Amino acid sequence: MKIKLLVITHSPTLPSGYGNIAADIFRGLLKCFPGAYDIMQVATRRDQEQQWPHWPIACLEGDSLSSNTNLSSELIRLIHESASSFQPDIVFFMEDPQMIQAITESVHFGNARKVGYVAMDGIMPTNKFQKLEKLDQLVFFSDFGKSVYKNGFTHEKMHLVIYPPLRRIKGKQVPKSDLFVGHESALRALHECEHSMLMGWVGLNQWRKQVWAPIHVLKTLRCGEYAECDQCNKIEIWPDSMQLKQSRGQKCVRCGKGTMRVGEKMNHLYLHVHRHQHASSPVWPMELLRSIYKVDDGLIHTHRRYKGKKVLGRGDMQDIYRHYDVLLYLTGGEGFGMPVIEAAMHGVTTICPNYSSQAEIVNKYGLGTTVNCTLQPESRTSNLRAVADMGHVIEVVKRIYRQKINHPQTHDSSASAYLAENNITAVARRWDSVFRVSHHQMIA
């Protein structure tokens, strides 16, 4: 008898993190265990331009059906009607903790077992996820997420960690000129200078993504607004020119041996920012950031409309990653950080704060370098967000640059260890075990 799964998350046709992961998990499950599962999905967000042949999807009209914290009455009704008609054995949720809580409080699923796949993108107040304890099984994207959750409770309960699956995506080797239209002068300089380096950043334009941080790094390096120890390469940032001059010749406070010198202007560094608009009023307006930092000659900015498409698919993003030398992923916290893995598929190293799930993955699989950070409460939510130590970031960028110049090499995949452990088949088997245990508990 087939196990009936009702999946509640983003549409698998939507090129979001949840959408991509849902596609990989459940296509893998159907492929590895044919005839074992009957799947139906309610899409909390959808791409209205795409069709999906692998399982039926119920959805409402429009691009975005809900915010991260609020459910529309239409979506609640759709979930209720889908559950009543499908009569699932298991309901699988993959959404933000607040969304899962809101759904389970609004919809009754009868005797179905409720399984939540939860990404914690930072340390947050306990009241934001305490009702998740009512789910029958919690599975976390990372050990970091599991630890954040467990710190909110005094009692012990079995919770699992399953990393998202990774599959190889064929690249098309699209040239830079096709990707970065409108930035021909920067591309020409990148091509003509053998010592140039392209840093990259991708993500939604929302507060925790901290898009200002990589632009600040670019400005500091291009303008030489820093001092550097001639022995240990410690960096001190001095945006004030007078203070910068005064730091010259001072003893290094870290090693105590070297002296500080004014940093070189690295005009051959470039930054590509590819952002997805998160709202009608972006949190970090790009035109204002350009006005403040004044690095237009080194900043390549593209947005989600690319090659006539409304949003980018995974194959399109691979076109972009393959041209980077380093992913400057200085976000305030990630539920997992798939861009880190996807960039690593092309041998691109990542620099990120030593916080949240992305740091766990970078450190565990050797996908880059984590830098020091401070934690700042986010407005309204009080979720703790990382703010990277800019001096430490610049030290790492300069080290990567020296390695690129002195030991040039082709971009080979550095994600092989992750792929070996978390390929589609391996992850499908883990989820099959979770679902079979939950189904057995339901019929027991």
Image (cartoon, rainbow, N blue to C red):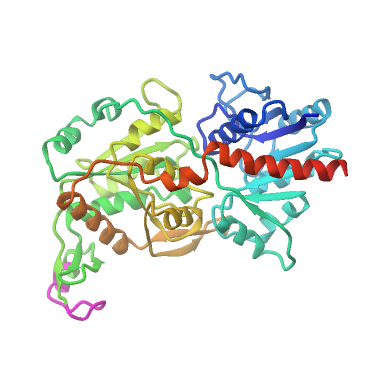
Which quadrant is the N terminus positioned in? top right
Of residues 229 and 212, which is closer to you in this image? 229
The quarter of the displayed image where residue 389 is located: bottom left
Which quadrant is the C terminus positioned in? top right
Look at the image and say whether residue 72 sits in the magenta stretch: no
Is residue 313 found left or right of 440 in the rendered image?
Answer: left
Is residue 414 found left or right of 109 in the rendered image?
Answer: left
- Give coordinates of residue 305: x percent, y percent: 40, 26
Residue drawn 51% across the image and 48% down it: 336
Residue drawn 59% across the image and 27% down it: 46
- Give coordinates of residue 344: x percent, y percent: 38, 44
Residue drawn 15% across the image and 75% down it: 259
Of residues 422 and 109, which is closer to you in this image? 422
Q: Which residues are magenta?
A: 244-257
Is residue 89 found left or right of 319 in the rendered image?
Answer: right
Q: Is residue 303 visible?
A: no
Indicate whether 427 appears above or below 393: above
Q: Is residue 424 visible?
A: yes
Residue drawn 77% across the image and 31% down it: 4
- Outermost residue, right direction? 444
